[in-house]
Amino acid sequence: MADLIVLGFDNEDTAEAVRTLTGKLMKEHLIELGDAVVVVRTQDGKVKIHQAFNPAAAGAASGALWGTFVGLLFLNPLLGAALGAGAGALSGSLIDVGINDDTIREIGQTLQPGTSALFLLLKQATFDKLSEALRPYNPKVIRTSLSYASEAELVRALAGQLDESKTRTPSAAAASQT
């Protein structure tokens, strides 16, 4: 089961910086991301969504590759690539994986102008290390799918108020509740 965590930041650039940080945390095997999306509410109130993964673009690229191969069979690789890219983009746009777009837009509309948010769909995480890495960015937890106790523990950890002798991962805390 994946956990959705939405973190808010006081300016437009911090969410993107933290998304870059999550890439480093993935390389260190501290987290496994299902998706990461940055939402920015500009000073003029416009909401901009920056997806880490674009299914339509990925579908177009793979479709163009397969279309070229099929086109070679019929001695027209350019037509095959064009048809394959179109079919791939269409199929990619119909597949919505990761974080629900309506949820992203809804939360983006609630942000104050000049702020940003980072949506993290975590498949797996070492929450104490994640909290420690995020603390310098001063994130605010906007929404999460964690249990209430785990969410409170994450908020305390981000604020640096967690007693180190009681450090547990939120998933371990949730497991101990059952």
Image (cartoon, rainbow, N blue to C red):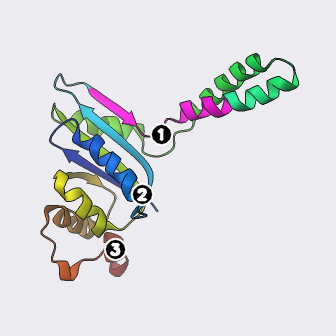
**Is the residue marked by circle 3 packed among few (<14), some (14-19), or many (20+) residues within 10 Å?**
some
The residue that label 2 is drawn on is: 26
Query: Horizontally, is 73 left or right of 174 in the view?
Result: right
Q: Position of residue 15 (x, y in %)?
A: 26, 43
Q: Specify the quadrant of the image occupied by residue 159.
A: bottom left
Q: Residue 52 colored magenta?
A: yes
Task: Please determine whether, in this image, residue 19 is positioned above or below residue 91.
Answer: below
Q: What residue is shown at x 65% (from left), y 34% (from top)?
A: 62
Tag 2: residue type? Met
Element class at badge 2: helix
Residue annotated with mark 3: 174
First of labels 1, 3 by sequence position = 1
Residue placed under numbered mark 1 in the picture: 53
| Span of residues in magenta | 47-63
Q: Is 84 left, or right, of 47 in this rendering?
A: right
Packing grade of label 1 (10 A; few <14, some 14-19, many >=20) is some
Coordinates of residue 118 in the picture (x, y in percent): 30, 45
Q: Label 3's element? A: helix
Q: CA distance from mark 3 to mark 2?
A: 23 Å
**Residue 124 pos. (x, y %):** 43, 64
Real-space CA distance between mark 1 and mark 3, rounded to the nearest whole angstrom: 30 Å
Classify residue 178 by image quadrant. bottom left
Query: Disc 1 residue type?
Result: Phe
**Callout 1: SS:** loop
Rendered residue at 62%/31% (across/down)? 61
User: How far apart, in angstroms, are the residues tagged by discs 1 and 2?
Assistant: 15 Å
- Amino acid type, callout 3: Ala
Give the x, y percent position of residue 23.
Answer: 39, 51
- Going 70% across and 31% down the picture, which residue do you hit? 65
Q: Going from the N terminus, do you reach mark 1 or mark 2 first?
A: 2
Q: Residue at x 30, y 62 (%)?
A: 130
Disc 2 residue crowd, few under 14, some 14–19, many 20+, Cα 10 Å: few
